Amino acid sequence: MSTKKLILGTLACLPFLAAAQTPVNPADVVPEKMPFDVPYGAAVSLDRAEAMLTASVMEAKKRNWKINCAVMDSGAHLVSFKRMDGGQIASIDIALHKARTAVKFRRDTKILEVAIQSNPYVATLDDVIASRGGLPIVEGDKIIGGIGCSGGTGAQDEVIAKAGLAALPK
């Protein structure tokens, strides 16, 4: 085989080799099932929302954190809200937003926080807050609301939201 043919053959293979080495964009992978396909259920009641917020505030007090917490119903409407004395004013709206986002997007806001780091398109979605501390309230495989907490670091907010979620009365 001549050198010229060898070079031409090698050059002809380069596009295929480059394509084989190109990493797959996760956004291009088509999942078999719909992710976060949790149906919406009946709204969380005021009494249950209050019990969750009481648990959240108790946990925050125990840690000496000044937190704001909100519970939204399954339609992303406010059911109840608590602002601790000295809680950051900006965190009022952030707590509301985290609870609303958890309901509307049917996932923890931490997932959006992680997603935005590698997929900037997430920032273009309406009503997204990409900061942990928002959790959907799921009962019987249905979303009945969302809890959102804000005022500390994202990790602190998430701890307080989880304390509230764990206190959901049956």
Image: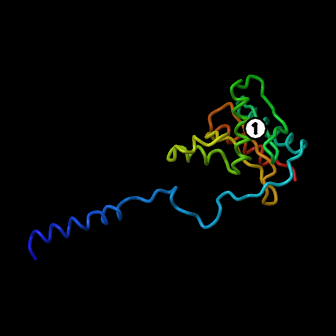
Which quarter of the figure has residue 4? bottom left
* Residue at 62 percent of width and 37 percent of height: 154
User: Can you say whether 149 is above or below 18 in the image?
Assistant: above
Tell me the amino acid under the disc marked 1: Glu
Which quarter of the figure has residue 70? top right
Badge 1 element: helix
> Where residue 59 sits in the image (x, y, percent)?
75, 38
For the N terminus, the quadrant is: bottom left
Q: Specify the farthest residue to the bottom.
A: 1
User: Can you say whether 91 is above or below 16 in the image?
Assistant: above
> Where residue 107 sits in the image (x, y, percent)?
68, 50
* Residue at 83 percent of width and 48 percent of height: 168
> Where residue 115 sits in the image (x, y, percent)?
56, 47
Q: Nearer the viewer, residue 92 or 20?
A: 20
The residue wearing badge 1 is 59
User: Can you say whether 131 is above or below 67 in the image?
Assistant: below
